[in-house]
Image (cartoon, rainbow, N blue to C red):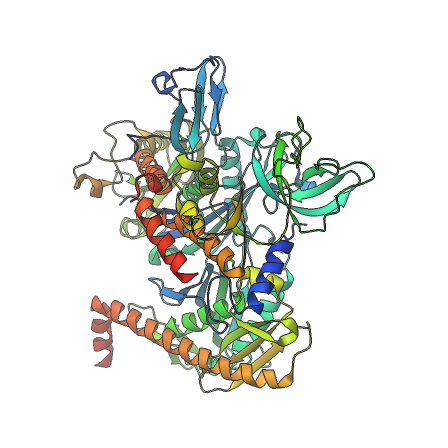
Amino acid sequence: MPREAEISLVERDFIQKALEEGVRLDGRDFNAFRPVELTFGDEFGVADVQLGKTRVIVRVSVDVAVPPPERKFDGVFQIITEFSPMASPAFEVGRPTDAEVILSRVLEKAIRRSNALDTESLCIIAGLKCFALRADVHVVDHDGGLIDASCIAVMAALQHFRRPDVIVEGEKAIVLSAREREPIPLSILHQPLSVTFSYYEEGNIFLVDADLAEEQVRQGEIIVTMNRHGEICQINKYGGAPVDPLDLLNLNNIALQKVKDMSKFIQQKLDEDAKRRDAGGLMAELSAENAR
Amino acid sequence: MAPEAILSHLHRADGSATYTHNGYCIIGAVNGPIEVQRRDELPEEATVEVNVRPAVGVGSPKERHLETLLHNTLRSIILTSSIPRTLVQITLQVRSLPEEEADCGIDSSLAILPHLLHTSLLALLSASIPLSTVLTAALVAIPSVSSSPLISPTANQLLRAKPIRSAHVFAFSGEGKLLLNESDGVFSLQEWDEAAEAAEEVCCKEEGGVGLGEGMEVDGKEGDNLDAWLREVVMDKVKWETRWRGAK
Amino acid sequence: MATSVTVVLPGDEVPKSSLPTPTGKKKTLTLGPGLRHIPPDTITATIAGALTTDNKKNAIWIDTNSGRYIPTAGDLVIATVQNSVAENFNCLLTPNTPYASLPHLAFEGATRKTRPVLAPNSLVYARVVSGGKHTSPEITCVDPSTGKSEGLGPLKGGMIFKVSLGMARRLLLKSKGEVIILELIGAKVGFEITVGRNGIVHVDGANVKTILAVGKALQEVDEQALGEKGQKKLAERVLKSL
């Protein structure tokens, strides 16, 4: 079975020595993200996030389905993560690695179970028809920080997505295409984002957004997910060396600042995209017709 | 419109390409030659693995079918005997499809096939995997009403020309030999001949071919065909790689 | 600027006119990477790139800067030791490739009694002995004719930096590679550099800052294809920061 090559001793020693001296390999501050780039596709619901050399593409799509019998008034929302050999030959199709399992669990807890998306709004006819929404996470290039990048991409794609409108007449529902009526944005309750801290030296050094080499050297990681109002959705520490509980409080403060900045960044990119789309005037025209 | 291509833009993969044409956007990555698993090892040649990943959802029989077609075609152009007991891993991620793709009236796996072939070829070139030749591919659709076949049509053109009686995909090697043909629908042998000829013209006719790049003529160039396009892409790659020679 | 380059695609036949005109003693034509000979006298390209010839050595090859490193006899590489089995160390030249074997005795002064001990994941600077396609590559840390290490052996301390294969080749070409940044920085600060053909550069110096500055500068020259002027500017900036 192919495995990710381990980092060499020389690199390990050097990264640790440099961190002791307060230097990161790329010259970043300990609490700094790599440069983030966010672009949207021509279609609604496609977000392409580049975090340094890491690149994640998320695509949100919708279908009509029967709601599960135990949740008649809810729609369906799934986040699907599957690594492909594109990001690294060590990723095998159909055999999830640990990183992949952790990523899908964190996204599940951070976004789906924190009710970021109002699934009730996806219901069309209770017990009979609902929208089934899915977010496909494609990891295209892997240089660490997958969780943070995926979280940004999923949230941005959800906010960018527009679902088709429906008309309900009794038991019958008609889904209207984009030409017939302007599609509507999803109802998003809050925007959780993750910040991953990697720690070294028994918890004396915490790094935000470690790259792959730094991830391979770290003693452990702590993933904090919160929204910009400072409401924590989840905190995760997968084993590793012990950390001082007081440090956790400190990390939350750092995370809040990062999440605020990132939310602002996403909003700014969404606004830019909306403006770009509006330039053609087609959407403006359509919405004017609908208003009448 | 000629296809757009960006080469070697991914950091981890040995070779990569993003290819955009007629509303299709595909990211391709190649790893190789790398270590092959014992069960897949071939003593005299390289193992070729093709993964096609759809934009939405996980792979279905349609992707498996495409993988088989690609595998057989690519294996015939990769010089597998020069890198024995290794693996060449090709991953193709569909990023976006044209909006009208679902209702353009032809089999969707046929419509995407030429684009997948081009993407994988570009990624293989980017990874410097030894090849015996290059390939170019084109889709030809024959509508029921009008007599002239549509060559490399956009989804929109197909939608307007509906109903389509038959659709054909042809792939040619650099020497102009037929590598792959997939046809669907009702057609006579004569129609198939015409379609094959039309595709050959777009793919590899040396001079005076009816080009895809009508847009190119504006720049004062001859009508380009796909072979010329491919040369241009490689030219750009070489220029990019050797730009340090002339740098200030 | 180089004069017009001939760009070839796989399957293209190399015309007789493009073959090198031998000026040296060597009469037989040498085919480099990316070319194959189809008997009786056809030479075709197998990869895409610029056709390059050397009249002195009567050689022709295709110049390209992409893809994975392919071990070739005589190349200097930086390998990562994975484990030790029987008489050999198993080493990786690039990730996810079959192991290259490094015999325990292929070190300077090594005997059956005094074998070198190398921990997993440590680095060695070695020369490729054979890179045949049917056998796994073999590397050595000793010059077989003299029995001396000639600079080869385990690498300790410092840091490694990844550069493109083309950049590694340029660095090993010395003055012809047009990389002057090392001399510019080296005039003021001392450091040690080891270049592996497999795209790895090892830098050792007095402190973390120097090592990082040199490594990053090399990567910048590589990525941005800096010319002489650009490299001078970069060197000034690097020296100022130290």
Residue at (26% x, 68% y) in the render: A277
How many circles with numbers are drawn on the protein? 0
* Residue A46, horizontal then vertical, whole percent: 40, 65
Nearest the camera: A274 or A6? A6
Q: Work out whether C59 lies above or below C186.
A: above
**In the shown orientation, is residue C54 left or right of residue C125?**
left
Residue at (39% x, 74% y) in the render: A159
Q: Work out whether A254 lies above or below C218.
A: below
* Residue B210, horizontal then vertical, whole percent: 24, 34
Q: Work out whether C85 lies above or below A29.
A: above
Residue at (45% x, 68% y) in the render: A153
Q: Quadrant of the N terminus of chain C?
A: top left
**In the shown orientation, is residue C208 left or right of residue B195?**
right
**In the shown orientation, is residue A116 left or right of residue C130?**
left
**Which quarter of the figure has residue B205?**
top left
Q: Quadrant of the C terminus of chain C?
A: bottom left
Residue B23 visible in rendering: no
* Residue A15, horizontal then vertical, whole percent: 57, 62
Residue A41 visible in rendering: yes
- For this orientation, the residue located farthest to the front is C188
* Residue B109, horizontal then vertical, whole percent: 44, 48
Residue at (51% x, 75% y) in the render: A194
